[in-house]
Amino acid sequence: MSDALDPEIVGLVYGIRLADSAEYRYVGMTESTAVRRFARHRANARAGRRTPFYDWLRKYDGGAVVDELELVRTTRQDLGLAEMRWIADLRGAGHRLLNLTDGGLGPSGVVWSDEQREAARVRSTGRKGVSRPGALNPFYGARHTAEQRARWSRDRAGTNAGEANPNYGKFGPEHPSYGHTMSEEARLALSEARKGAGNPNFGKSASAETRAKMSAARRGRPMPSSRRSAHTRYHTNKGAWSSRCEFCDSIIERQFALLVLQGDEKA
């Protein structure tokens, strides 16, 4: 069984069973490999996730195996349909699948009642999330292949752009971030995280084409090259003074600004 999917393969449908049995107990789909998806299932089971399938996997973890049932080379929609077809066919053939839904890309299968939703809300209120940092995380040290990242990028392109963005057209109090301010600790942590190699542009330089575009966009716009020159242009030369400017505090600068104002009055 391969470690990585062929770039032309969108995903696959897999089945999990006991090594000494031909009866499948779970069917799923993945855009990764069956081996990696099975490893994630086993990690979820060890972490204590409670579903009929994970309860079964905890009990028979050592004897469970995974099989590739079908490779899909067309679209994600076809991948979801293939999973639904396998689940329906195996259930019809008498396999005691532990899937909670009928498969597919959407939340098909189980529809919660209002009472179930309220009970789940009460159970989860105040519950701390399960965090598995570092080596405890099942994906620790692993890395998605370039083909997988390219496939995700292609499939998700434009999903949150323009009117597809849930916050599109929301301004002021209507925007969920309205009035939100970061704490001083959060600002400092963000600043430290983005210094040096943590900056996404660290070690990068703009191409000649990009620099030309930036130059054209800023042509004719006054842009002081430093705080000192900005002070000279907007404060000293206009006889202004600002308490927020670090250069306006000197006596010489104040005297020079006064002379500028007197010269304007005489003129």
Image (tube, rainbow, N blue to C red):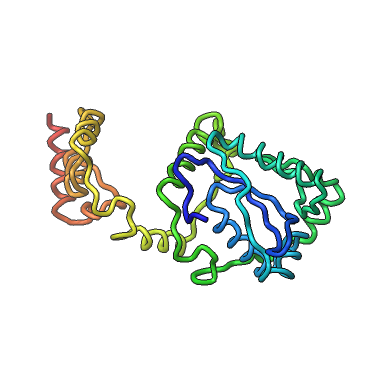
Residue 257: horizontal and vertical position, in percent? Answer: 17, 44
Q: Residue at x 59, y 67 (%)?
A: 131
Q: Left or right: where does residue 126 sit relative to residue 93?
A: left
Q: Residue at x 67, y 52 (%)?
A: 15
Residue 263: horizontal and vertical position, in percent? Answer: 12, 36
Residue 123: horizontal and vertical position, in percent? Answer: 78, 61
- Above or below 203: residue 12: above
- For the residue pair 95 and 45, the one nearer the viewer reads as 95
- For the residue pair 247 and 9, the one nearer the viewer reads as 9
Q: Left or right: where does residue 203 sit relative to residue 109?
A: left
- For the residue pair 151 and 16, the one nearer the viewer reads as 16
Q: Is residue 26 visible?
A: yes
Position of the C terminus, as image quadrant, is top left
Q: Tell me the quarter of the picture where residue 170 sits.
A: top right
- For the residue pair 238 and 49, the one nearer the viewer reads as 49
* Number of on-image labels: 0
